[in-house]
Amino acid sequence: EIVLTQSPGTLSLSPGERATLSCRASQSVSSAYLAWYQQKPGQAPRLLIYGASSRATGIPDRFSGSESGTDFTLTISRLEPEDFAVYYCQQYGSSPWTFGQGTTVEIK
Amino acid sequence: QVQLVESGGGVVQSGGSLRLSCAVSGFTFSSYAMHWVRQAPGKGLEWLAFIRYDGSNKYYADSVKGRFTISRDNSKNTLYLQMNSLRPEDTAVYYCAGGWSDYYYYMDVWGKGTTVTVSS
């Protein structure tokens, strides 16, 4: 099973600041098989990024994804009030599909 | 408008069974790979089960293998999760989710979830 470790657990930032979230895989994951989701309290997750760097339909361009080896990064260039939420990475390259434990982006 | 509506959740005693349904509209269900994902109270997301668009392949997390069964009826645009031998640790919100690709199985559509509570 591929274990995804997200860091930090919590990120405290102000609106307008840049957020950098990390996701490290325990073994090789092709960039084609890494996604990021956003979840707000009481809501279902929403797909942000697939294939490590492709934005899903309707996702603003302030969200971007990148990868370097087994490390993946989600960057939010300028935080908007609606971006404060929990973010999960997920690999879908092999079963069992796995999620990271999540990073909470909270208002400082 | 894309809609996935889960139903069938509720309170059940340990050892009992439930069948969850996910009724889909607004997209071609028969072309979508589908998943069940759950979230225990205050916890992260846990993938549970996958079924290919035509039902030809199914995969399960070890935590539910042998107890849960995923299935689909493309004529009814509905996904199912039969849950047997339920345990208190199965208490969670259960989401159905799907993706249009038959190769890259990320989840681009999600339901709002249904709550399952297993009492001991």
Image (cartoon, coloured by chain):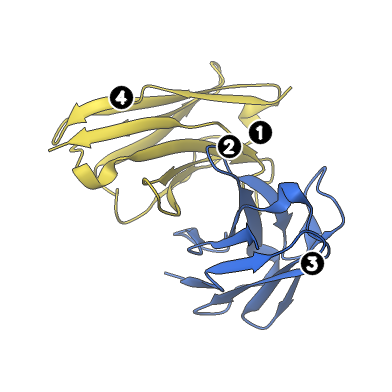
User: Does the image show residue B67?
Assistant: yes
Task: Using the numbered discs, state the Cα–Cα distance from disc 3 to disc 4 in whole angstroms.
Answer: 42 Å
Tag nearer the camera, 4 or 1: 4
Label 3 residue SS = loop
Tag nearer the camera, 2 or 3: 3
- In front here: A90 or A16? A16
Sequence order check, earlier mark of 2 and 4: 4
Q: Chain letter for yellow?
A: B
Sequence order check, earlier mark of 1 and 2: 1
The structure residue drawn at horizontal position 78% and vertical position 69%, both measured from the top left corner, is A18
Dot label at residue B53: 2
Tag nearer the camera, 1 or 3: 3
Q: Chain letter of disc 1?
A: B
Dot label at residue B10: 4
What amino acid type should be assigned to the residue bearing mark 4? Gly
Label 2 residue SS = loop
Task: Using the numbered discs, state the Cα–Cα distance from disc 1 to disc 2 in whole angstroms.
Answer: 5 Å
Label 2 in the same subunit as label 4:
yes
Circles 2, 4 touching at the beta carbon (< 8 Å): no
Question: In this figure, which residue is indicated by the disc labeled 3?
Answer: A17
Label 4 residue SS = strand
Circles 1, 3 touching at the beta carbon (< 8 Å): no
Categorize mark 1 by other alpha carbons within 10 Å: few (<14), some (14-19), many (20+): some
Circles 1, 2 touching at the beta carbon (< 8 Å): yes
Chain A pictured colour = blue
Residue A61 placement (x, y as % from top left): 87, 56
Residue A64 placement (x, y as % from top left): 80, 64
Q: How many marks?
A: 4
Label 1 residue SS = helix
Q: Chain letter of disc 3?
A: A
Question: In this figure, which residue is indicated by the disc labeled 1?
Answer: B31
